[in-house]
């Protein structure tokens, strides 16, 4: 079917991003919002808006019934879920399709299969994709966990099958740790995700987080190369790049092909990301999970491939075949994204909602700023603190970094504390410039380098 109207079932910068893609395709947009979000940018940009409930996410953006009813009442053809919220909820995808509308993403069954991190590991293994050494399935008892740990060794990670957003992961240094954390981890996972299922993975030390962007139309699958996302805090990405600059061409080819093989094995439809850990010393990569949605960091891939991933998602959902062939997808230069959060990096990343009294956005060749901000906007305290993403493109990584520094200096968000100073410091760091970092780098750097720079009030949690 041709999609003529879309309900945007998200908020913030990604809602704005979806509206822009829809407008470019001549598609009408209807934006949902909670009572706290009536004045958000996406509401202003959309053709129509619907109030779906109180500020608490459970009452609005996570309320399947409220969102499905809003879509039905608006009479839209399709629903775009963005990231977070209901984007990886298979029941939501099923409910949209059962109501006769198109869910812009994979089929509910594919989300169900790949969203369960234990089931996804099995799919990966079956497709010949190397996984992190660990348990074969969900662990029912501590005895099973102990047996796995004895086989793989320590340190080991206890991970929630339903985890996401960096939550539901604990490290056990030894057997005593494992025995202590295991029951707690299960109870916490049950409370947080409604599923107490756990599995174990050996800790890959000095790893880089590398992930492959894929696109599938249910028949064909292509990859749009990889991203490097090792700069993380609390296992959440802070800064992302494309491509992964230290990956040998031969490893890149194997990595991207493995992601395509995995997606093919399930007849994947839509945009998705296959995440891996990469060990530079052995040149081995290990599958960790699949995200069956658009990701926060998708713009870096768009900058180096020229593909509009959100537009492609919409076209595919409408039944069109992929508009790109693998041989036509080429890498052009380098891109870096800085996630800008309304948080005070000098005060333990304390959330800093409030009113944006002034906004100056850098402009110029190779600079993109995806945001929900406008002057006078009040950032509500109820949601994720991401307020924008500064993305810079350059011919080489070095020119990209130079351009990034200038762009960060030209970005002024007044009235609220943001993570811009953190990114300025990172952009000027020697190790970052050399690309000498792994997934543990940023947290150590925050304690040593940044704590010093941040002055006497610094208090890094
Ligand atoms: P991951 O790092 O797991 O691949 P992403 O970084 O791409 O995931 O972003 C998804 C995460 O962003 C969610 O798990 C959630 O914690 C957070 N999130 C959810 N909704 C929003 C939103 N509207 N704006 C910003 N962040 C969100
Ligand atoms: P989420 O679903 O929360 O995104 P992931 O499984 O993708 O969780 O892992 C998030 C991050 O945690 C990774 O990017 C990496 O930094 C770290 N991590 C996950 N598994 C391992 C592992 N086995 N060894 C080392 N680090 C890991
Ligand atoms: Mg992940």
Image (tube, rainbow, N blue to C red):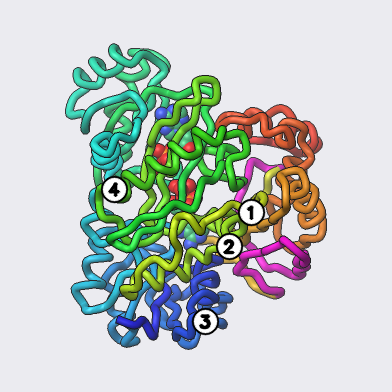
Per the model, the C-alpha gap separating discs 2 and 4 is: 27 Å
Q: Earlier in the sequence, mark 4 or mark 1?
A: 4
Query: Which quadrant would residue 232 be assigned to in this image?
Result: top right
> Residue 161 versus residue 289: which sits nearer the camera?
289
The residue that disc 3 covers is 23
Which mark sits nearer the N-terminus, 3 or 2? 3
Q: Report the residue that reaches farthest toward the front.
A: 327
Cβ of mark 2 under 8 Å from ligand 1: the answer is: no
Residue at figure coordinates x 27%, y 65% from the top left:
92
| Disc 4 to disc 3: CB gap under 8 Å | no
| Badge 4 or badge 3: first in the primary sequence | 3
Identify the residue under disc 1: 332
Q: Between marks 4 and 1, how big is the CA–CA gap?
A: 30 Å
- First in sequence: mark 2 vs mark 4: 4
State the image coordinates of residue 130 (x, y, percent, origin top left). 35, 31
Asked if residue 372 is among those painted magenta in the image, a careful observer would answer: yes
Q: Is residue 352 magenta?
A: yes
Verify CB contact (< 8 Å) between mark 4 and mark 1. no
Disc number for residue 306: 2
Asked whether 80 or 344 is in front, the reply is 80
Q: Nearer the viewer, mark 2 or mark 4?
A: 2
- Which span is picked out in magenta? 346-375
In the rendering, at what x and y percent does residue 115 appear? 30, 49
Is disc 3 in contact with disc 1, using a CB cutoff of under 8 Å?
no
Identify the element where label 3 is drawn: helix
In the visual, does 43 lie left or right of 2?
A: right
Q: Residue 207's spot in the image, x, y percent?
A: 52, 28
**Real-space CA distance between mark 4 and mark 3, rounded to the nearest whole angstrom:** 31 Å
Q: Which residue is drawn at 43% across and 23% down?
A: 203
The CA span between labels 3 and 2 is: 18 Å
């Amino acid at each position: 079917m041709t999609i003529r109207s879309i309900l945007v079932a998200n908020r913030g910068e990604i809602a704005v991003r979806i509206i822009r893609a829809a407008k470019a395709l001549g598609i009408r947009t209807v934006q949902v919002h909670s009572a706290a979000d009536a004045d958000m940018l996406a509401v202003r940009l959309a053709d129509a808006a619907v109030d779906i409930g109180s500020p608490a996410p459970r009452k609005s953006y996570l309320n399947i019934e409220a969102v499905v009813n809003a879509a039905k009442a608006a009479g839209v053809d399709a629903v775009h879920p963005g990231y977070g919220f209901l984007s990886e909820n298979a029941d939501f995808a099923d409910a949209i399709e059962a109501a006769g509308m198109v869910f812009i993403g994979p089929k509910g069954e594919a989300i169900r299969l790949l969203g369960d991190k234990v089931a996804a590991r099995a799919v990966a293994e079956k497709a010949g994709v190397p996984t992190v050494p660990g348990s074969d399935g969900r662990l029912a008892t501590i005895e099973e966990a102990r047996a796995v740990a004895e086989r793989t060794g320590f340190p080991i990670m206890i991970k929630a099958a339903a985890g996401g957003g960096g939550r539901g992961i604990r490290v056990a240094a030894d057997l005593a740790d494992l025995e202590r954390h295991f029951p707690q981890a299960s109870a916490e996972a049950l409370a947080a995700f409604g599923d107490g299922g756990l599995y174990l993975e050996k800790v890959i030390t000095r790893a880089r987080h590398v992930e492959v962007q894929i696109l599938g139309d249910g028949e064909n699958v292509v990859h749009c190369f990889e991203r490097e996302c090792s700069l993380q805090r609390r296992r959440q990405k802070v800064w992302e790049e494309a491509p992964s600059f230290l990956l040998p061409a031969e490893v890149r080819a194997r990595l991207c092909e493995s992601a395509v093989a995995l997606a093919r094995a399930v007849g994947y439809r839509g945009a998705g990301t296959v995440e891996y850990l990469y060990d530079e010393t052995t040149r081995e990569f290990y599958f960790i999970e699949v995200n069956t949605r658009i990701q926060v960091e998708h713009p870096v891939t768009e900058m180096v491939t020229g593909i509009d991933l959100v537009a492609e998602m919409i076209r595919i959902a409408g039944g069109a075949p992929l508009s790109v062939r693998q041989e036509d997808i080429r890498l052009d230069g380098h891109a870096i994204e800085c996630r800008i959060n309304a948080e005070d990096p000098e005060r333990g990343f304390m959330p800093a909602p409030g009113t944006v009294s002034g906004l100056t956005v850098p402009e110029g060749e190779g600079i993109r700023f995806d945001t929900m901000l406008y002057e006078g906007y009040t950032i509500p305290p109820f949601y994720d603190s991401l307020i924008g993403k500064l993305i810079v493109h350059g011919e080489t990584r070095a020119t990209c970094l130079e351009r990034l520094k200038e762009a960060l200096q030209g970005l002024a968000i007044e009235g609220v504390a943001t993570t811009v100073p953190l990114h300025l410091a990172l952009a000027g760091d020697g190790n970052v410039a050399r690309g000498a970092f792994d997934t543990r780098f940023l947290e150590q750097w925050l304690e040593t380098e940044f704590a010093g720079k941040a002055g006497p009030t610094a208090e890094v949690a």
